[in-house]
Image: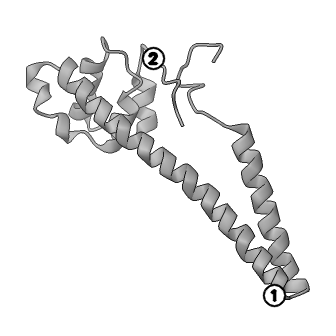
Amino acid sequence: MTQPQTYANHVRIVPLYLAALAILGIDAAWSLYDVTTAPSIASVRAAVVSMALVVLAVYARGFALRAQDRIIRLEMRLRLRTLLPAGLQSRVDEFTHDQLIALRFAADAELPALAERVLRDDIRDRRAIKRLVAEWQPDNMRV
């Protein structure tokens, strides 16, 4: 990344993945069209395979994101146990999964105060928490 990561530009878009998914979707639609206009064993097989490929692509991305989120949750619990004052360390398990994922962008110096505010004000929306981050800690290893 050539520019510093911020809330405005932190979402990772992988153009080749989106292009491949679009191609698979178009192929699935075309295959379904073939089944309805010229039904045959070959057209049904092609439709089933093309739909399976779309499902596979979507699930593969979802599995990778789920694994990433689990790692972030573990990383953030360790970070919070290290950085939070003693009074807040006992509350680490109160953070929701979404709160932990959003808080990962806060720099170490900012994290204790922001974490306390998130718990105190019961802020649960990822976007709202990310908008509160003043000193952005980039995550350039996203899936």
Q: Is residue 4 found left or right of 67 in the rendered image?
A: right
Front in this rendered view, residue 99 or 24 = 24
> Which of the 4 image quarters holds residue 35?
bottom right
Residue at image location 49% in from the left, 45% down from the top = 65
Crowding near pointer 1: few (<14 within 10 Å), some, many (20+)? few
Residue at image location 63% in from the left, 56% down from the top = 57
Disc 1 target residue: 41
Precedes in sequence: disc 1 or disc 2: 1
Q: Position of residue 55 (x, y in %)?
A: 62, 64
Q: Position of residue 50 (x, y in %)?
A: 74, 68
Q: Position of residue 128 (x, y in %)?
A: 42, 33
Amino acid type of the residue that numbered disc 2 sits on in the rendered structure: Trp
Image height of 7 relative to 122, above or below: above
Q: Quadrant of the C terminus?
A: top right
Count of marks placed on residues:
2
| Numbered disc 2: secondary structure | loop
> Which of the 4 image quarters holds residue 25?
bottom right
| Numbered disc 1: secondary structure | helix
Q: Position of residue 4 (x, y in %)?
A: 57, 13
Front in this rendered view, residue 45 or 37 = 45
Measured Cα–Cα span from mark 1 to mark 2: 55 Å
Front in this rendered view, residue 43 or 92 = 43
> Which of the 4 image quarters holds residue 87?
top left
Q: Quadrant of the N terminus?
A: top right
Crowding near pointer 2: few (<14 within 10 Å), some, many (20+)? many
Amino acid type of the residue that numbered disc 1 sits on in the rendered structure: Ile
Q: Residue furthest right?
A: 38
Residue at image location 68% in from the left, 63% down from the top = 53
Residue at image location 81% in from the left, 64% down from the top = 27
* Disc ID at residue 136: 2
